[in-house]
Image (cartoon, rainbow, N blue to C red):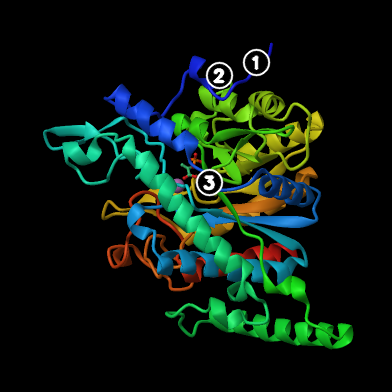
Amino acid sequence: MTTTWTPDSWQKRPALQQPNYDNPGELTEALKTLSQLPPLVTAWEVDRLRGQLAAAGDGNAFVLQGGDCSESFDDCNSGTILRKLKVLIQMSLVLICGSKKRIVRVGRIAGQYAKPRSADMEKRGDIELPSYRGDIVNRSGFTPAERRPDPQLMLRAYERSSLTINYIRALSEGGFADLHHPENWDLEFVRNTPGSRRYQQLLESLSDSIRFMEAVSQGELTQLTRVDFFTSHEALLLLFEQALTRMERQRGWYNLGTHMAWIGDRTRAVDGAHIEYFRGIRNPIGLKVGNSMAPDELIDVIRILNPDNEPGRLTLIHRFGAEKIRSRLPALAEAVLRSGCKVLWSCDPMHGNGQTARNGIKTRSFDDIMSEIITAFRIHKEVGSRLSGIHLELTGEDVTECIGGPGNLSESDLTRDYRSQVDPRLNYEQAMEIAFLIAEQMR
Ligand code: PEP
Ligand code: CO
């Protein structure tokens, strides 16, 4: 039985992972302001992304989705945004050369501010305070004032998202993204590693090809002077998302705070508030699929989210872990094939591979991440389905958060430059190595 959908119909369902705001007046005021601010994206852009995802689902493109686990207000600066864009563009070039396919670039960016947490409260010694839920809800410092959920932070997050997307747009349209000048995407700290030499070689052969094509066509290949770059975040904080949900005449309801939104593994209950909210918006939807998802349940959720079986609407992002993927993925992929539901499969090799180092720091091993990706390609092929995307937590910085990889980081390196407030991210070298690995898998 389906009931009528409205932007607030989710409020009749159990909503997990929402903060407790203590001042209703203040909350209402902030949401009202938010709902009157201009949108960050347009329905045309959202539709264009849906079209590109449909092509990827058919095997004609590949999706590269990546960025921070959680953006932070402090990192909303030109250098950090620029480096994130650079690493994603560099990775996409590697993937284009390997796969000879179009790459759909989607950042976990310009709105990735809300985090689900395993406990509502955090205890340190005798003091217990609300858990940190991302900069859009409260602050990470451990004082009562910092941990109080503050509705004003939704406005601060929206403003920062707007600054971020404005800068991304400027960069992706003009000179910076011009394939004739890949030196624009160089990072200042790149070492002389096998990966960076491989990347330089790839650029050289690419420049040759471009010069050849332009000589043949007697003109500049103008399509090469810009890139498409889309935004995405986990639409976790439903009051915020509702305020950004707008009716576009004759097209329906869109969340105009982002191009694509995804549902986290902790909030994907069939009868929960998040599924109810998502089913009514026209944006492409991501659904995290973790170890507790049963095949029947998955098909039920797919039918709720995409009743018209529209291509490009639904991306299933599986995240099992390097070991568990072997036992979990085949049954789910087979069930989807049998159902005839059109979905795009993407692999998140990050969230099933968390581990705690001996010094107590949260990390992930590069080898586990790599192994989950290889296994994902293999299983989809065996089953007769297709892996069409990758979902990564990464940064353009030289951080030390995941162990292993080209720099062979060990547990003792983790303390050197660990910046993430939440999950550990691939650093620049590790991210590029993953891009080369995926390119090889697609070849
Ligand atoms: C995330 O993508 O940051 C996340 C929390 O993932 P998941 O919902 O898959 O655990
Ligand atoms: Co994360």
Can you give x and y, in whole percent of width and height, for residue 144 in the image? 17, 36
Name the outermost residue toward the right.
216
**Distance in Å between CA atoms under marks 3 and 1:** 38 Å
Q: Which residue is drawn at 57% across and 27% down?
A: 277
Q: In which quarter of the image is residue 6?
A: top right
Specify whether residue 236 is in view. Answer: no
C-alpha distance separating marks 1 and 2: 8 Å
Q: Quadrant of the C terminus?
A: bottom right
Give the x, y percent position of residue 391: 58, 52
Disc 2: which residue: 9
The quadrant holding residue 371 is: bottom right
Write down the residue under mark 1. 4
Q: Residue at 69% across / 74% down in the picture?
A: 225
Q: In this view, does 38 lie above or below 226?
A: above
- Amino acid type shown at disc 3: Gly
Give neighbour class at mark 2: few <14, some 14-19, many 20+ (Cα, 10 Å). some
Question: Secondary structure beneath disc 2?
Answer: helix
Viewer-side residue, 66 vs 369: 66
Write the residue at 48% across / 59% down: 394
